[in-house]
Structure formats: structure tokens, C-alpha cells
Image (cartoon, coloured by chain):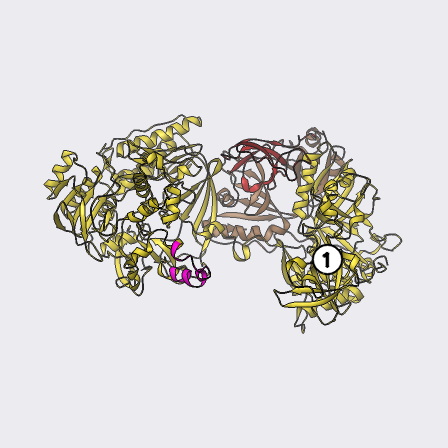
């Protein structure tokens, strides 16, 4: 055990057990997986991406490049999880990844011997030829060799949800700067949201031995958190990662609600996606310590100095027994002192700088460390872990090398609106450029490194933001250290043997950067893509700046000239499931039942999704094994007796006003101002570009009152179009309109017996005789307690009516119609039978109204009025849209009646080669017609009806169809319309 | 004479769940609802005050009277009355001033009450429902999950919400799943 | 992104539908200026008041400069 005997923010009264690669281990509440592994002396946690080199924990935070593990098992297996942020819980199961057969003996580590092959640009150069080998051979090989974790491959068993929040000030980061900012804002009376990715507020205050206002860091954090929590308008979200700064002060954040629980309680979401609207924000995301680039810098036991302090002070876990520090900063020296304070033998402090602050030097020496100034490490010994280093010719036997290269402010969120970070010579780091509007950056994220500066900066940033919002700002002041924080950057330590890694997660070395420079990939964006620097799941949080500094040096440019890559959301990986929330599977989008859904369900209907609507597709009866049998029966029932079908999904728009008729004349290509009251008319509307937008019937219920129907699919689009035409194009027209799609349940009653059925139902409330209510009649009257609308419309070609009642009464209407029609043999029919009958009648539907057809293409060219202007008129006259060669609507039937037609088949002349150049059009709809006893189809064929009688091929290579068909008129049943007018 | 039995939008869709104080979600049944669209240049305010005793909201607001009016757009309101016949005279009362279109059958009306009601709704509605920003009398036509809804606040912890009838099952599922996720009980 | 609907107030982008650049009728079929900078577009507050708006915004920053009703309420 390397657990220190005392200290740390762990709860020693709450022991936890967990396993790593099957080994049972123990930790405490308050541990991360990483700190528990360290406390259990586990040094080797993974194999590297490309070379399968042994790797150990490198950091203690979300920037971790090495410690990626699979968490959980079964469907919950979560690959590429950072051990450094995974909160330990009882029963946690973790396993290493990218190793085979085991972590200790990884056979693919031979990749390391092939290293010369794996340098930057290797894939591009080596696997170029022959091209066909890429998919079949190279890619599978590479993927097997250079892998990350494995996805479970099973459906995600967990729930996810979403939430929204609004605040005056969003504080991103709960370290000293963030806490100071939140406190200032809360005391001023503002609405505050404070987010921190960690499960505990405090940031570096939990990891460093510092005090605020005379209290030890963690105690001050606890006191501050308690004060904040007492404000009603302060919300503290821990375990919450703000991953993106979007437009207008909108932020995306993901809260982990259950990843730390041994068992997720039923229904509790695993994660919650927050959208937060903040009038102002303070980015206090802190800084990430910079590694040093030297030979052997990736061996287990080499660890960031700040992480060493975190493991010692926060988790009471010793990452080694004999340590040395390699530094170019004053922070490194503090690490040596913390190691000594924890009782860990610290043999040397190796500072590349010629000088270091004398008090630090004296203290380190007092603790027994040898001090080497202006020195470098020339060799790192050890295979699966550091055994020793050589510096300035001296050998030190150690198992832990703490490395300190300075700090990189976490500026990513400040760059999400495109403001590139700028290089500060004074701070030796990239600092925020122009942050998004309303955002200020405070503390270490702005390059301020001492505790006192961070606290003051946080309070000032919040104070400034609140003053802008009109709050009387309170700027609390805190007593804290201004500790030494000098940094002299060192981008490439001289000497050393072995690979010097820049990007540990993607195995990019200093040599790779040199090759990129030699080959001309000198822009940081090109460097990134050529070497894959910073493209791993850690997005280069520890590697980017070093890589960019190296390319700057190699090309003789300053850091400012070389610049850095642009960060985009998300700042850390976010599970796609979090974005989906509860909208997946059956709830992917709302399913809209029709008003008669419960009735149809009771009859055992099979339902189909028609856009968002869920409609009855057919009503199978016992003994019917094939849906075609069912549909055949339903069609026959309508053609010989009577059937009913819920058609409420058609869009319905109520249009009223003195100019309503004029408006419709402009919307439709045919005329509506001449439509008498009490009649309906079929209308066709075009888009501005002259192609067909939609069709439907519109009825005139009064001199200034119309009710329009649209297709189901286009209901919303047509409403939007009408509103646009009225509000933008013709605002002076006097009319008002409202969608009444939801208001009316409409049921089609179709078939030769439909009149008898309806008359039975409505009695003497209305006269349905052909004389009183002819084809295309429309009426509104009272039936019992409700107002109903009746239309004599037919989609099936039979004598038919559509009866509309308020949707609340739709279910009852369907039941009443069934009862009234029982003696007549009424049957319900679904969308499939509806579709068959409209094809038999040659009515255009979705296959023909496909956004590429003109009125002429659909055989409706005569509807286009020459006497008035309407939307689409001019553009419909374009040569391309009036070309007689355009495919236009025809009917098709197979020459051999047993042949089946399939929608999507392409037309070819008999004997023509099946190539695109010979394409004559395609089959847009097809169905088995019970009436004709054969398959029939509608299609768009070049020169259309001019070819009636001709034989052509319906060629369908995808499904293996090749059928000889005869071109015919598209109306297969009752072409004279006698049944319709009965 | 044929009498058709109405079916409310949320019939069979709302169930109590969880324990504790929670939020009560009840469907209001048998209401009358209409779109009221002012005719060109017409001012409805005096007439509505005179007949219905309601101050017609000039923005997105809710005003109760013999009939309640909810502002849903410039020159556009929803009129809401208790009982199916509550708006029987509305069209005649306003005919020279407004187009009145019956919507009674097309929506479900929910009443949500309880301390957690605003937080529950906020999970699906991207609107600031803090009492300071959305006080009693405030209204909004907005989006809950993927559904168009009209929402107004009737008291510190009470809201009413109109849901298009065909979306009632989606909203009922959303309510149940979200309340579970937030640990909020749903009561009748 | 938030758009300040003149009737409803600040609302999320997801409540709106964008039709494209606001150009004189007839010239908006295939022609687009696509400027880098301020531009006026037609947006409809579909999940709100349903009004068509003229929204002026900067394509470089996504800052919404102004939003007004395409049609005055009295019209």
C-alpha cells in the first residue's frame, strides 16, 4: 500500500472495493480510480495507442492522456474513460485497454520495434497503393493494432435527460477564482450558476498546501460552498462539465448524475444535458501543467508535478517511494517540498534554469535533496516503470520523476467563438484572445498563477460583469499567499536517449514534429493533421502547446507567429446519448395518434408512421396471414359496399376575410374566387420556382370563409408558406387564418353504400341526396351537441363523403359509423388500401409530389390559369419546365399479369442497354390492384401519355426486377367517373 | 338524435408516480377554446372588457374574466372558457372586430401545481420560468421537448398549459420520464 | 443562439425557421448575396407567435442586431 498514514480528503471510514483487470483492490470514498490505483501501487495502467508502450498515470485531472480505461461491464462498458476523473465507488469494475493478451505482456508492443515505420505521415505514404487494399487489408490491420477502448456494442441501458437554466452570471470552474467570482455575484444578489467538472469544489485548493483567510484551503472551500448554497438564486452544479460556449450567451454542459453510484436507481438519468443562458460568464477553468519533452518521458513513473501534489495532499496516495523533480518552474520546487513533507525520499531537484529562488533551494536541500541547476536528464532507465535517471552525469535510483514545465491556461472555451488565444511572453503561455461576448476570463485561465491573484481576479471579474448588469457590485477581498511562480519555458530538453514524446495519447514524438517541419507542414493546423498531434480524445490538453512551440522553433518563428490551433466545442467528449436525451427508440420524435386511435387499436389495427403521425395501416382479421390479403379485402369492401378511414392527418387551415378568395387565387394555380359557397374544389399550389408544392381540396363555407386541406406531409410547410405570402408578400390583404388540423377529426366514408350509411347516422339533420348534395359539395351543420362539416370528396373514386367533427369526438364518430353501418357490412380500411385505391384512380401522391414535378408532369397542366397571376406562374414557364421530353405521369401494367411491379424501378426502352444514359423515367407508385387482379403502377416517363400502348422495361437491379410493362392511362378504375357522381 | 361522447386529450395518459410532495398534474376537461384574430385595424380591448370583464393582454400574457384571454401573437389571442358552451356567444359578440375559430377539440389543457412545477417545466421548455421573469399572468407560446405548447402562470406555483391533442401522449411520456429523472413525484 | 422576437421576447433558435435572405419578392429565388457581415433574413417564430420576422444579424459573429415583425400588427 502506498496510502499515506494521514491527511487527504478521503473518508477513511468508508472503505470501498473495486477491481482493475480482475484484481480486487481497495480504496476510500473520495478517491478517484486513479488515486486508488496509486494507493494500491498500480503503476502500469495502459498501453499506448500506436507503439503499445507501457504507460502509467500522468496527471490527476481531465487532461489525462494515458490513464484511459474501460469502466463497467456488459451494456454499460464505457471505453476511454479517464481514470483520473472517474469517481471511485463500491464495486467499480475497470480494465485496461489496447493490450493483448495482458497489460504486462502486450504482444503488439513489437510495434515499438517497427517504430521507424510509424512516424508521421506513415499511413498516408505507406498504405496508398494499391487503393483497393485500403478497405480490405490495411484499415482493419491498423485498427486492430492501434486501438482504443471497445464500445459495448449493446443498446445503452441508461436514461438521459435535459434541463435548461438561466442566470445573470455563469461561473465555469469551482477553484479559487471561480469561488471568489461566485461569492461576489451571490453577495450582490445576482442569479448565479457555478459549474465544476470535479465531484468536489475547490480546484487546486484541494491539492496544494495553502490557506485563505487563515483557513486551510479545503476548509475555506467548505465554508464558501456553505455560504453560496444558502442563497436561493445560486445553483451549484458539481460533476458538471461546461463543454461549449455557443451564440448569445448559451452554454452547453453535461452533468454526471449516476456515474459515481454503484447501482443506478431505476429511472435516474445517467447524465443530464444542460443548456444554460447566461447574461455574463466568468471562465475560471484554471490551467493545465505543461510536460517537458525529453527522451523516455513517457515511462510509468514520470508524472506531472502538480499531479504528484494532488495525489499526496488530496488523496493521501504516494505515487512513488523515491522521487526526483525535473523542473523549469518554481512550482517544481514546491512539489519537492510537498514530497518531503509527506515523508517521501526526494533525492534530487533538477532545474534546467541556471537559478532558482534561494529559499526554495534551501528548503529542498534541507529536506535532503541534491540540487542540480542548469541541468538536464540525459537518460531514463526502466522498462515498465522508471528505475532511475541520469542528470549532469549523476545517476539517481528513483521510481517517481515529477515534471514541471509551466502552465497552460485552459482557454478553450474562450476560443469557441473564434477568438484565437494569443501568446504572452510575460506569462510564457497562450492567454485568451477575444472571448465570446459577455465572457471574462479569470485566474489561472487568464495566466494568473498565484492564489492571491486568482482570488482577487475572480472577484474582480464577477464585479465587473455585475456592474454592467446594473448590480451594486460587491468585491470581496481575501488573504492568501502570493507564492513564487516563476517559469522559464523549455520546449525540448537537450540530450537524452529514446523517444521524446510530445503527445502521449497519440504517440506523437518530437521527431514526428521534425519530420512534419521538413516536409513543409509548418502551419500548426497542418502539423496537427499530418502528425495527429492533439487529435486524440484528450484533444492535446497536455501536448498542443509543446508541439506548437517545437514547430515554431524548427521554423525559426516566434510563438506568436506560429500561433495555436483553434478549439471548438465540445471541450471534452460528450456522449451522443446525452444530446439525444429521452428522444430515442420509440420516443425519438413524438408519435401523433389520430383522433380515432383508440378505436382502431381496439380493432387490432396495424399502425404505420406517416411523418409524425401514427395511422392505421390495415385491419387484419383472423385467418389473414398476408397483409396483401387484408388490403385486398379492404379495397374490395370499399369498391363493393362501404368502408371508413380516418383522414384527420390531412392539414386543415381556416382562412377568413374580405380578401380570402383573392388570396387563394394567388396561392393556387387554379381559380377559387369563382367557387360557390357550399362547394369544394381540388387545388394545386406551386412553389416560387414553378414546381408543385402541394395539392388538396379547399371548400367555401361562406362568402369570406374557406377551409383548405393540405397533404399530411406538407401541412406545416403549407401553413408556413401561406403565412409568408400574407405577412411578407401581401400584408395589405384583409384576411386571417389559423391551423385547425388538430381541431377536426375527419373520417372518409367511401363506397357505393356510403350515402345509406351516413343518412342512417345523421337522420334528417341533413339531406344527402345527389340532388341536394352533389359531388364536391361542402356543408357545415349541427349534429346533436356538435358542429360537423361534411364534404362530398373522393380519393378512392367511389361515391364518398368526408365527415368532420371536433377531434374530441372523433373516436366516438368512428364507433358510431361502425354501428350505423353494421347492417351494410361496413369495414374500416387503412392507409395501405387508401393508397391502392388512389393508384387505381391515378391520383398523385407522395411518390409523384416529390418536389421535382411540374403541374404538367402530373397531367394537371390545364389547371394553371392563364387569367390571373399566382405563385410560381412565371417560373413554371421556363423552357426546362415546359420541355415536352420531361418525364410525365402515365399508368403502367405488366405485360405478364403475374409479374410484380416495384416502386423505384427505372424505365428503359425494350432492348436498350441498362445504363443511365438510356433512362426513360421511373416508377413512382405501385400496388396490387384487387379490382384489376394484377399489379399496376404510376410512373414518370419521358414524353408520357404520347407513349400509351408502348411496351417498355421496368428495370430494378437493386431488387432484381426486370419486367416488361405496357404504358397506359393513369386512371385504371372508372375512368368516366360514374361511381364518383352517383 | 346522435350524441357523440367526447374523449379528452389526456384520457388514460396521466398516472400518479413517486412519493413525496411533488407536482400535481391534472387535466382540465370540458373547456371551450377559440382562436381570436383581430380584424384589420380593429381594437377589441373595450368590447372584451365590457362583455367578459377581462383586460385583453397586449403581449404574451394571461387575463382572467368571465372568459380568459391568452395573448399568443400580435392581434391574436386564445379565448378559454369553462364548460363546452362558454364561448357560444363569442363569435357574435366580436364578429365585426375579430375572426373567431373554434379550437375546443384540438387541445388538451393541463394544470400543474406544486413547488417543483417551474423546475419540472424548465426541463423541457427553454424559457426562464423564474418567478421574477415569468410571474403570474405571464404567458408564452413555446416548445416543450418537440411540441408546440401555450403556457401561462396562474399563481406562484401553478401553471396551465395547452397541448395539441395529437401530442398528448408525447407530453405525458415526457412528464413521466422527466419527473422520474428529477425525483419529483407526480400527483393527480 | 437566441433571437429577440418582438412579440415573445428572447427565444432559442430551435423555435424558429429561417427562410433565407430577405430580398425583394421575385429576386429571392436563386440569388443570394451571402455577405460576410450584417445581413437581413426572414425567420418565422414557428414554435411561438408564428409571425414572420426580419432578423438582422452578423454572419461573422452570429450577433443578432435587430428583429422586427415582417408585418405590422394592425395591417
In the rendered view of the protein, which quadrant contains the C terminus of chain A? Answer: bottom right
- Give residue A246's position: percent from left, percent from top: 46, 39
Does the magenta segment cover residue B31? Answer: no
The region drawn magenta spans A125-142
- Give residue A289's position: percent from left, percent from top: 28, 42
Of A148 and A285, which appears nearest the observer? A148
Location of mark 1 (residue): A941
Q: Could you tell whether A436 is left or right of A811 in the image?
A: left
Does the magenta segment cover residue A129? Answer: yes
Residue A89 to residue A209: above or below: below
The structure residue drawn at horizontal position 73% and vertical position 57%, both measured from the top left corner, is: A941
Chain assigned brown: B
In the rendered view of the protein, which quadrant contains the N terminus of chain A? Answer: bottom left
Q: Which subunit holds the residue at mark 1?
A: A
Of B172 and A976, which appears nearest the observer? A976
Residue A780 seen in this snapshot: no
Of A653 and A926, which appears nearest the observer? A926
- Give residue A9's position: percent from left, percent from top: 25, 47
Q: Could you tell whether A776 is left or right of A654 in the image?
A: right
- Chain C rendered in what hue? red
Residue A227 to residue A782: above or below: above
Q: Could you tell whether B2 is left or right of A294 in the image?
A: right
Residue A620: quadrant of the picture? bottom right
Of A485 and A166, which appears nearest the observer? A485
Chain assigned yellow: A
Callout 1 secondary element = strand
- Give residue A949's position: percent from left, percent from top: 79, 63
Amino acid at each position: 500500500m502506498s496510502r499515506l498514514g494521514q491527511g487527504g480528503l478521503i473518508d477513511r471510514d468508508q472503505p470501498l472495493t473495486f477491481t482493475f483487470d480482475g484484481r480486487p483492490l481497495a480504496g476510500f470514498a473520495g478517491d478517484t480510480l486513479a488515486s486508488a490505483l496509486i494507493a494500491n501501487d498500480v503503476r502500469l495502467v495502459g498501453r499506448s495507442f500506436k507503439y503499445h508502450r507501457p504507460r502509467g498515470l500522468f496527471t490527476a485531472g481531465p487532461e489525462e492522456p494515458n490513464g484511459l480505461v474501460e469502466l463497467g461491464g456488459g451494456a454499460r462498458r464505457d471505453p476511454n474513460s479517464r481514470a483520473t476523473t472517474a469517481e471511485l465507488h463500491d464495486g467499480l469494475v475497470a480494465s485496461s485497454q489496447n493490450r493483448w493478451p495482458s497489460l504486462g505482456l502486450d504482444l503488439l508492443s513489437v510495434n515499438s520495434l517497427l517504430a521507424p515505420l510509424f512516424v508521421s505521415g506513415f499511413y498516408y505514404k505507406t498504405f496508398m497503393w494499391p487503393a483497393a487494399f485500403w478497405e480490405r487489408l490495411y484499415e482493419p490491420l491498423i485498427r486492430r493494432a492501434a486501438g482504443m477502448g471497445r464500445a459495448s456494442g449493446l443498446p445503452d441501458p441508461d436514461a438521459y435527460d435535459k434541463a435548461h437554466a438561466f442566470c445573470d452570471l455563469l461561473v465555469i470552474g469551482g477553484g479559487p477564482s471561480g469561488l471568489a467570482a461566485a461569492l461576489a455575484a451571490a453577495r450582490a444578489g445576482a442569479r448565479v450558476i457555478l459549474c465544476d467538472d470535479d465531484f468536489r469544489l475547490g480546484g487546486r485548493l484541494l491539492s496544494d498546501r495553502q490557506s485563505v483567510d487563515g483557513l486551510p484551503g479545503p476548509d475555506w472551500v467548505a465554508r464558501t460552498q456553505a455560504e453560496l448554497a444558502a442563497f436561493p438564486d445560486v445553483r451549484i452544479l458539481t460533476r458538471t462539465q461546461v463543454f461549449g460556449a455557443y451564440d448569445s450567451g448559451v452554454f452547453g454542459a453535461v452533468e454526471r448524475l449516476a456515474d459515481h453510484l454503484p447501482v443506478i436507481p431505476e429511472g435516474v438519468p445517467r447524465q443530464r444535458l444542460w443548456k444554460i443562458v447566461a447574461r455574463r460568464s466568468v471562465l475560471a477553468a484554471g490551467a493545465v501543467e505543461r510536460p517537458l519533452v525529453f527522451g523516455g518521458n513517457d515511462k510509468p513513473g514520470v508524472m506531472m508535478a502538480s499531479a504528484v501534489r494532488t495525489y499526496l495532499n488530496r488523496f493521501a496516495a504516494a505515487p512513488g517511494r523515491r522521487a526526483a523533480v525535473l523542473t523549469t518552474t518554481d512550482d517544481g520546487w514546491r512539489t519537492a517540498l510537498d514530497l518531503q513533507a509527506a515523508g517521501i525520499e526526494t533525492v534530487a531537484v533538477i532545474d534546467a534554469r541556471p537559478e532558482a529562488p534561494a529559499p526554495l533551494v534551501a528548503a529542498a536541500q534541507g529536506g535532503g535533496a541534491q540540487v542540480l541547476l542548469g541541468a538536464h536528464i540525459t537518460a531514463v532507465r526502466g522498462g515498465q516503470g522508471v528505475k532511475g535517471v541520469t542528470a549532469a552525469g549523476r545517476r539517481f535510483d528513483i521510481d517517481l520523476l515529477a515534471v514541471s514545465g509551466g502552465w497552460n491556461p485552459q482557454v478553450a472555451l474562450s476560443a469557441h467563438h473564434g477568438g484565437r488565444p494569443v501568446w504572452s511572453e510575460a506569462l510564457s503561455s497562450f492567454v485568451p484572445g477575444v472571448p465570446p461576448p459577455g465572457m471574462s476570463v479569470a485566474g489561472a485561465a487568464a495566466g494568473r498563477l498565484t492564489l492571491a491573484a486568482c482570488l482577487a481576479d475572480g472577484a474582480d471579474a464577477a464585479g465587473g460583469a455585475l456592474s454592467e448588469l446594473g448590480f451594486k457590485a460587491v468585491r470581496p477581498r481575501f488573504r492568501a499567499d502570493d507564492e513564487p511562480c516563476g517559469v522559464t519555458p523549455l520546449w525540448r530538453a537537450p540530450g537524452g536517449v529514446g523517444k521524446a514524446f510530445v503527445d502521449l495519447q497519440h504517440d506523437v514524438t518530437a521527431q514526428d514534429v521534425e519530420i512534419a517541419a521538413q516536409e513543409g507542414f509548418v502551419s500548426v493546423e497542418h502539423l496537427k493533421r499530418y502528425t495527429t498531434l492533439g487529435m486524440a480524445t484528450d484533444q492535446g490538453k497536455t501536448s498542443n502547446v509543446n508541439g506548437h512551440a517545437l514547430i515554431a522553433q524548427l521554423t525559426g518563428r516566434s510563438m506568436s507567429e506560429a500561433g495555436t490551433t483553434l478549439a471548438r466545442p465540445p471541450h471534452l467528449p460528450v456522449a451522443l446519448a446525452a444530446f439525444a436525451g429521452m428522444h430515442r427508440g420509440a420516443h425519438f420524435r413524438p408519435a401523433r395518434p389520430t383522433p380515432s386511435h383508440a378505436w382502431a387499436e381496439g380493432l387490432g389495427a396495424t399502425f404505420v408512421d406517416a411523418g409524425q403521425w401514427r395511422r392505421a395501416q390495415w385491419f387484419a382479421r383472423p385467418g389473414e396471414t398476408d397483409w396483401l390479403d387484408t388490403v385486398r379485402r379492404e379495397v374490395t369492401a370499399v369498391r363493393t359496399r362501404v368502408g371508413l378511414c380516418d383522414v384527420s392527418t390531412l392539414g386543415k387551415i381556416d382562412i377568413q376575410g374580405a380578401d380570402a378568395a383573392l388570396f387563394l387565387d394567388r396561392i393556387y394555380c387554379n381559380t377559387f374566387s369563382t367557387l360557390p359557397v357550399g362547394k369544394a374544389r381540388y387545388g394545386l399550389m406551386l412553389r416560387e420556382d414553378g414546381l408543385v408544392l402541394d395539392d388538396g381540396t379547399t371548400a367555401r363555407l361562406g362568402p369570406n370563409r374557406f377551409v383548405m386541406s393540405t397533404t399530411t406531409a406538407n401541412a406545416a410547410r403549407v401553413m408556413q408558406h401561406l403565412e409568408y405570402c400574407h405577412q411578407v408578400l401581401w400584408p395589405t390583404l384583409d384576411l386571417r387564418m389559423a391551423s385547425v388540423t388538430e381541431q377536426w377529426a375527419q373520417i372518409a366514408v367511401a363506397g357505393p353504400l356510403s350515402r345509406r350509411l351516413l343518412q342512417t347516422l345523421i337522420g334528417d339533420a341533413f339531406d344527402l341526396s345527389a340532388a341536394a348534395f352533389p359531388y364536391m359539395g361542402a356543408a357545415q351543420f349541427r349534429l346533436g351537441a356538435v358542429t360537423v362539416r361534411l364534404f362530398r370528396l373522393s380519393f378512392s373514386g367511389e361515391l364518398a363523403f368526408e365527415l368532420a367533427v371536433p377531434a374530441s369526438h372523433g373516436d366516438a364518430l368512428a364507433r358510431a359509423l361502425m354501428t350505423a353501418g353494421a347492417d351494410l357490412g361496413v369495414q374500416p380500411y387503412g392507409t395501405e388500401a387508401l393508397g391502392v385505391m388512389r393508384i387505381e384512380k391515378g391520383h398523385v401522391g407522395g411518390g409523384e409530389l416529390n418536389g421535382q414535378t411540374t403541374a404538367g408532369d402530373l397531367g394537371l397542366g390545364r389547371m394553371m390559369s392563364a387569367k390571373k397571376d399566382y405563385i410560381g406562374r412565371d417560373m413554371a414557364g421556363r423552357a426546362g419546365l415546359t420541355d415536352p421530353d420531361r418525364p410525365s405521369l402515365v399508368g403502367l401494367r405488366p405485360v405478364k399479369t403475374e409479374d410484380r411491379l416495384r416502386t423505384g424501378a427505372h424505365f428503359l426502352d425494350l432492348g436498350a442497354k441498362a445504363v443511365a444514359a438510356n433512362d426513360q423515367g421511373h416508377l413512382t407508385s405501385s400496388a396490387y390492384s384487387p379490382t384489376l387482379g394484377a399489379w399496376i403502377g404510376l410512373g414518370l416517363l419521358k414524353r408520357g401519355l404520347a407513349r400509351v400502348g408502348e411496351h417498355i422495361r421496368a428495370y430494378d437491379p437493386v431488387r432484381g426486377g426486370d419486367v416488361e410493362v405496357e404504358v397506359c392511362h393513369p386512371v385504371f378504375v372508372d375512368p368516366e367517373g360514374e361511381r364518383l357522381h352517383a | 338524435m346522435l350524441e357523440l361522447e367526447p374523449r379528452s386529450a389526456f384520457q388514460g395518459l396521466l398516472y400518479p408516480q413517486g412519493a413525496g410532495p411533488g407536482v400535481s398534474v391534472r387535466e382540465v376537461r370540458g373547456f371551450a377554446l377559440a382562436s381570436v384574430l383581430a380584424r384589420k385595424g380593429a381594437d377589441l380591448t373595450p368590447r372584451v372588457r365590457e362583455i367578459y370583464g377581462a383586460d385583453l393582454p397586449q403581449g404574451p400574457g394571461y387575463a382572467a374574466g368571465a372568459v380568459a384571454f391568452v395573448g399568443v401573437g400580435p392581434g391574436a389571442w386564445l379565448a378559454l372558457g369553462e364548460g363546452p358552451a362558454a364561448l357560444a356567444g363569442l363569435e357574435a359578440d366580436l364578429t365585426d372586430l375579430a375572426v373567431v375559430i373554434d379550437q375546443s377539440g384540438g387541445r388538451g389543457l393541463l394544470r400543474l401545481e406544486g413547488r417543483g412545477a417551474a423546475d419540472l417545466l424548465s426541463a423541457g421548455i427553454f424559457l426562464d420560468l423564474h418567478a421574477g421573469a415569468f410571474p403570474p399572468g405571464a404567458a408564452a407560446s413555446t416548445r416543450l421537448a418537440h411540441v408546440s405548447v401555450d403556457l401561462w402562470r396562474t399563481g406562484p406555483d401553478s401553471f396551465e398549459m395547452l397541448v395539441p391533442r395529437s401530442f398528448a401522449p408525447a407530453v405525458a411520456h415526457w412528464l413521466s420520464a422527466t419527473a422520474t429523472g428529477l425525483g419529483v413525484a407526480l400527483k393527480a | 443562439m437566441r433571437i429577440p422576437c418582438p412579440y415573445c421576447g428572447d427565444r432559442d433558435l430551435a423555435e424558429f425557421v429561417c427562410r433565407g435572405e430577405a430580398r425583394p419578392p421575385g429576386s429571392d429565388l436563386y440569388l443570394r448575396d451571402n455577405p460576410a457581415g450584417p445581413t437581413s433574413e426572414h425567420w418565422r417564430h414557428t414554435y411561438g407567435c408564428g409571425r414572420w420576422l426580419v432578423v438582422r444579424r452578423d454572419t461573422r459573429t452570429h450577433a443578432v442586431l435587430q428583429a422586427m415583425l415582417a408585418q405590422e400588427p394592425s395591417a
